[in-house]
C-alpha cells in the first residue's frame, strides 16, 4: 500500500482535536502524541501536524524553532553548513526548524508517509507564504532512524555524537525546489 492508495488528510493539531487511534513501534512517540502534544501547543513549544484517514491517525510530526550553531558542529560539519551560504559573514548560528517528533503508525510503516512528512515540512518552509527566515531543518534522529534521514538528504552535523542514543542531523532547505 502506498499513501496514494486511499484518502488521507493533513491537519494541524488544535487543543480541541480528537486524536484518532495511533500506535507506532515506539512507546515514547505514542505517549507524546496522546499525552503531551496538546500541552506543547498551549505552551507554544511545538506545533503538531497529523496525517489522518477516516478512522486512524496514520502519522504525525511536530515542529519547533531551532538554530544550527557553530558550537553544535565539528569543524567539517560547520564547513558543510556554511559552504553554500553566499556572503557568509562570521555568524555563529543560522535559523532552523526542528522536527521534534516524527512517527508513523505500525499499520502504515513502509507506505511512504515518513517521506511525505519530510516533503510537507519542505513545503511549509520554502513556500511564498513563509512567515520567518529558516534555512535549515534539524532533527535529533534516533540511531535506528538515521538511515531514513540520510535517504531524505539529511547530513550529520558532527561525528562527536556517534555513540549517543540520537544523532544531530540537518537539511539545507536551499537544496530543494518545489
Image (tube, rainbow, N blue to C red):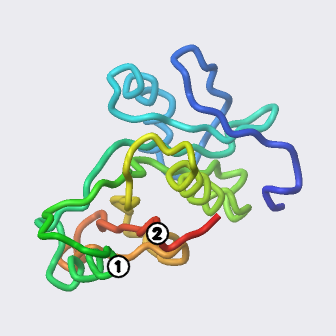
Tell me how far mark 2 sits from mark 1, CA to CA: 9 Å
Q: Residue at x 65, y 58 (%)?
A: 116
Mark 2 and 1 residues: CB-CB less than 8 Å, in contact? yes
Q: Position of residue 12 (x, y in %)?
A: 58, 32
Q: Position of residue 91 (x, y in %)?
A: 15, 65
Element at label 2: helix
Q: Quadrant of residue 23?
A: top right
Quarter in which the C terminus is drawn: bottom right
Question: Which residue ends up furthest to the top in the rendered image?
Answer: 16
The residue wearing badge 1 is 84
Question: Which residue ends up furthest to the front in the rendered image?
Answer: 87
Question: Which residue ends up furthest to the right in the rendered image?
Answer: 5
Nearer to me, 136 or 145: 136
* Residue 40, above or below 133: above
Quarter in which the N terminus is drawn: bottom right
Q: Residue at x 73, y 36 (%)?
A: 56
Nearer to me, 103 or 91: 91
| Labels 2 and 1: the sequence-earlier one | 1
The residue wearing badge 2 is 174
* Residue 70 appears left or right of 157: left
* Residue 58, above or below 118: above
* Residue 125 appears left or right of 59: left
Question: Which residue ends up furthest to the bottom in the rendered image?
Answer: 76
Q: Position of residue 85 (x, y in %)?
A: 31, 74
Amino acid at each position: 500500500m502506498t499513501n496514494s492508495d486511499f484518502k488521507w488528510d493533513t491537519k494541524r493539531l488544535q487543543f480541541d482535536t480528537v486524536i484518532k487511534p495511533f500506535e507506532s513501534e515506539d512507546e515514547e512517540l505514542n505517549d507524546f502524541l496522546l499525552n503531551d502534544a496538546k500541552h506543547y501547543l498551549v505552551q507554544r513549544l511545538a506545533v503538531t501536524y497529523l496525517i489522518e484517514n477516516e478512522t486512524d491517525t496514520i502519522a504525525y510530526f511536530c515542529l519547533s524553532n531551532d538554530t544550527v550553531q557553530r558550537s553544535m558542529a565539528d569543524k567539517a560539519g560547520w564547513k558543510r553548513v556554511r559552504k553554500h551560504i553566499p556572503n557568509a559573514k562570521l555568524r555563529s548560528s543560522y535559523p532552523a526548524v526542528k522536527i521534534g517528533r516524527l512517527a508513523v503508525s505500525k499499520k502504515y510503516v513502509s507506505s511512504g508517509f515518513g517521506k511525505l512528512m519530510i516533503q510537507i515540512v519542505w513545503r511549509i518552509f520554502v513556500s511564498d507564504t513563509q512567515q520567518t527566515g529558516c534555512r535549515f531543518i534539524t532533527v535529533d534522529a534516533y540511531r535506528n532512524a538515521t538511515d531514513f534521514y540520510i535517504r531524505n538528504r539529511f547530513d550529520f552535523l558532527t561525528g562527536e555524537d556517534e555513540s549517543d542514543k540520537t544523532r544531530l542531523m540537518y537539511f539545507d532547505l536551499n537544496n530543494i525546489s518545489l
